[in-house]
Amino acid sequence: MSLGTIIGVLALLTSYFVYWEWYSRQTVPKGVPWVGRRHEWLSKMRAGWRGLINAKSLVTEGYYKYSKNNQYFIVPNTLAGPELLVPTSMISTLLAQPDEDLSSMEYHNDFMQGDYTFPDRRISENRIHVGLMRKAIPRQIPSMMVDLMEEISAGYDEFWGTDTDQWQDVSLHDTMMEIAARMSTRFFLGPTLCRNREFIRAASRYARSIVYTAMLIRFLPVPLRPLLGRLIAVPIQYFFRQWGKYSFPLIKQRMDDLQRKSRDPSFDYKEPNDFLQWQIHVSLAHPDPGEHAGPVIGARAAIVNFASIHTSAMVTAGTLMDIYSTPPEEGVAQYLHEEVIRILGEESGVWTKAGLQKMTRLDSAVKETLRLRAAGASILSRKVMAPEGVHFAGIYLPPGSTIGAPAWPVMHDPENWPSPDRYDAFRFSRPREEFEASRREAAAQTAVKVDAAEDAEEKAVLNEGDVAEILYHKNQSLLNTSETFLAWGHGKHAW
């Protein structure tokens, strides 16, 4: 290596360090303590590397030292930048801030570097697919339960096999990615592509490439991202074209069928029931003509498909690891199997929304994995969008800075969760089952007391506590978040 090259590399590294120190000063409020920062040369930069390598440890330190004493602290991270974390007592105040001041969407767009990793800029600028997911998915899942469970079952049969006598080695993460890709594709794109191995492979590679590319781009100083970010993201475009080789003809066919049906009502066409079809309708009704293009519709479908594949695979793999890592004498797998078989029998062997809601043990096992394996050290992150900054509860937040709340230590705090580092599969279902058992035992006595009450007001008082406890236990399900269960957020932007 020549002397000039060495000097050039050293100059580049020095520039990067100086930039990071300057950037850290511009994007954090003054006077707030940092965790992981020491009295040393380039202290913020080096703290950022500590935050990247051991974020959960640093956030835990700040949580017990500051958050539990109702104080703010700053956690460093070279990839995401320094972030102000509020005490848990301020979570409700944070969630109440308007999106135009503190934006969850813009934070996540920055985190995923959507301007470079997403196939089309409209996805970052106009998030119509997000509203569609929130409104349509809860309504449509019940009608697709049978199809989705059929796809999941077929995936396990193919990748794990059906031989119950011989053991075989499988890669849990890789097979979960494949199965999640099939299930997700069935929901978002319909039955045509979900068992096409080449398409599923392209979808899985596309999902992975977005995550890794976003990580690389976040290493770059912000001024260099418009140039180098697009170069780094070139492989994503290749994987997207591979994805589109199979999906674009399907999208075009569906749009052609819709247009033909509108011209000729006698045309025999039954619309598919999946996300792609809903997206086509929403996009065609949008005032921006650019949204009507097949590749743009495909780009939106690709992004939601990516998000579903990655999260579904991680949660499923983690839950399976936790279930089968428990001591056999606890009988976790046996109790779960018994519950599923019993409730499926009650539902005539068909997977239904009502049946799934009855599977409180299964619900609890998944929720416990999410609590125990919290993906991030912090949560509820927002980016300050107001050009003049934001005054938040006595703290000035500069424009472009980020604010959030601790997650990992909250869900591992013994004051919130007894034995927090232990996987207790039925942590959430056990109290409900005990309550329902005691309620059945006391049903006769309660009925007698209520009937003997002298007036309607007294009867209402006797029933009030029972109703309140029923609602409490129902709110412990997987879909419900709280200020102590923050696995995927809390409030209106929770997923």
Image (cartoon, rainbow, N blue to C red):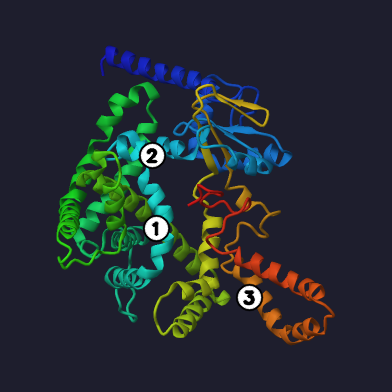
User: Whole-percent x and y of residue 358?
Assistant: 52, 75
Give the labeled residue for mark 3: 433
Give the labeled residue for mark 2: 112
For label 2, the crowd category at 10 Å Cα-Cα, with few meaning under 14, some 14 to 19 and many 20 or more, is many
Give the labeled residue for mark 1: 136
For label 3, the crowd category at 10 Å Cα-Cα, with few meaning under 14, some 14 to 19 and many 20 or more, is some
Residue at the image position 37 percent from the left and 42 percent from the top: 127
Q: Tell me the kind of residue under disc 2.
A: Met
Separation of marks 2 and 1 at Cα, in angstroms:
24 Å
Residue at the image position 50 percent from the left and 68 percent from the top: 323
Helix, strand or loop at mark 1:
helix
Q: Tell me the kind of residue under disc 3.
A: Glu
Residue at the image position 63 percent from the left and 52 percent from the top: 484
Residue 317 visible in the displayed image: no
Q: Which residue of the protein is positioned furthest toward the right in this rendering?
A: 454
Pick the quarter of the image with the N terminus.
top left
User: Camera-side residue: 180 or 215?
Assistant: 180
Q: Tell me the kind of residue under disc 1.
A: Ala
Helix, strand or loop at mark 2:
loop
Q: Are marks 3 and 2 in contact (CB under 8 Å)?
A: no
User: Camera-side residue: 22 or 247?
Assistant: 247
Label 2 or label 1, whichever comes before in sequence order? 2
Q: Nearer the viewer, mark 2 or mark 1?
A: 1
For label 1, the crowd category at 10 Å Cα-Cα, with few meaning under 14, some 14 to 19 and many 20 or more, is some
User: Whole-percent x and y of residue 299?
Assistant: 26, 45
Q: Quadrant of residue 291?
A: top left
Residue 296 visible in the displayed image: yes
